[in-house]
Image (cartoon, rainbow, N blue to C red):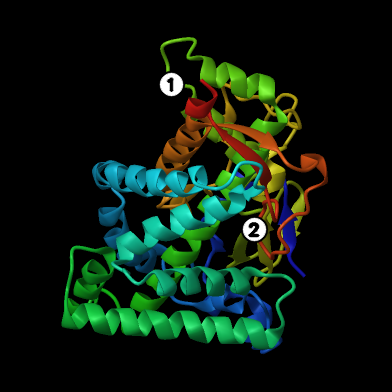
Amino acid sequence: MAWAVTRRDVADKLMTHPQISKNARLHWGAYLEGRIPESYPLLQFVVSENMLTVDGEDHARLRQPMQRAFTARRVEALRPCVEGITKELLDQLDATPPGTVVDLREFAFELPVAVICELFGVEDLQIRRQLAVDSGLLLSSTASDAERLAAQHGVFATMAQLIEAKRAQPGDDLTTALIAEGDSGNLSEEELASTLFLTLVAGHETTRNLLSNAFRRLLQHPDQLARLLSGDGDADPWPTVIEECLRFDAPAATTVFYFAARDVQIEGVTIREGDPIMIYNAAIGRDDEAFVHPHVFLAHRADARQHRAFGHGAHHCIGAALARLEAHIALRALFERFTVTPAADFDALAQVPSLSSNAPIHVPVHLASRSALQ
């Protein structure tokens, strides 16, 4: 049993409450009592030792190296890299035969995988893809226990190989920087591997979902897309669009888990010590007490950024700026280069079978180069 939180004001109070913790190893009653089996699908995400699963001084210690890697200056320095990867992927799409049905979720897969692996210093394309596939299996709601366990072993085995390779031949990358933190005593070996694992999943899957959702919603609202592409006004409209996409379809439907370190009274409810709490980001984005007409997609919505798709408080997503940068570059480049039309009924698209991911399983479209139409 877990408490489900769907209102933004309640979620904000809990995510900043001094007696609400992220540490399952200290505060999850069922886990401490031995009632959670090893096969539990989310166990790896809940009990691994990284900045997402600890509080206080340990959280600050584990988060600081990542903050240095994701400063505004460092993220902006990645712009040429993201632009180059995006152009290469769009060139490949431009080469597809006319009339081909293109799945934009594949484009949404390739871009963040390439970016995060550039950060890691992973050059082998096959390793890049396998890491992404394995991380997807860990979140799948239909994978068997055996498949999930194999994926978990695969990811951590690859991380171990990467760490060994970067110890032997350091580079100008995140893996090398985190190894240096470990060598200085700031990270244990387990924390190092777990931090890389967390960055992989958070940096690839959520951005893939953000892009997939944005493609779908903009194509479902061609009038709003046309206004975006018309160039009216001085301000860049894409940042606001991205926030509305994050609000309307949070890429991670839920935030796994918070725990009550003591009994907590909130909104007339007592959350008992040891109880888990699930924050429903997708529901918060549609909270009718927080947003006017929350079930209406409005590309120009002024308060869209008040969503909680990237969390809130001390555990706010450290990679949010990079996700926004990737989405800004990719959406603008795709729609300015191609006329895009749906190749299926977008209202009937199936969702990804996942324990957390919130996105359509496919985004099938037809593409026509705008230059070829002129």
Find disc 1 in the rendering and name its residue: 236
Q: Which residue was labeled with disc 2?
A: 357
Residue located at (77% from left, 43% from top): 344
Above/below status of 120 relative to 97: below
Residue 7, above or below 298:
below
Residue 8 in view in this figure: no
On the question of residue 87 being in view, the answer is yes
Q: In the rendered view, tell whether residue 10 sits above or below residue 188.
A: above
Where is residue 355, by image quadrant? bottom right
Bin the neighbour count of mark 2 within 10 Å (Cα to Cα): few under 14, some 14-19, many 20 and up.
many
SS class of the residue under badge 1?
Answer: loop
Query: How far is mark 1 from mark 2, CA to CA?
Result: 29 Å
Q: Nearer the viewer, residue 314 or 202?
A: 202
User: Percent x, y for residue 286?
Assistant: 72, 37
How many numbered circles are shown?
2
Question: Does label 1 or label 2 sit earlier along the sequence?
Answer: 1
Residue at the image point whose x is 44% and y is 82% from the top: 156
Image position of 116 (left or right of 232): left
* Left or right relative to 33: residue 45: left
Q: Amino acid at mark 1?
A: Asp
In the rendered image, which quarter is residue 54 located in? bottom left
Q: Position of residue 174 (x, y in %)?
A: 27, 64
- Label 1 neighbourhood size at 10 Å, few (<14), some (14-19), many (20+)? few
Q: Amino acid at mark 2?
A: Ser
Q: Is residue 41 above or below residue 348?
A: below
Residue at 35% across, 84% down? 160
Q: Looking at the picture, tell me which residue is in the foreground, 129 or 254.
A: 129
Quarter residue 285 falls in: top right
Considering the image in quadrants, where does the N terminus appear? bottom right
Residue displayed at 83% across by 46% down: 348
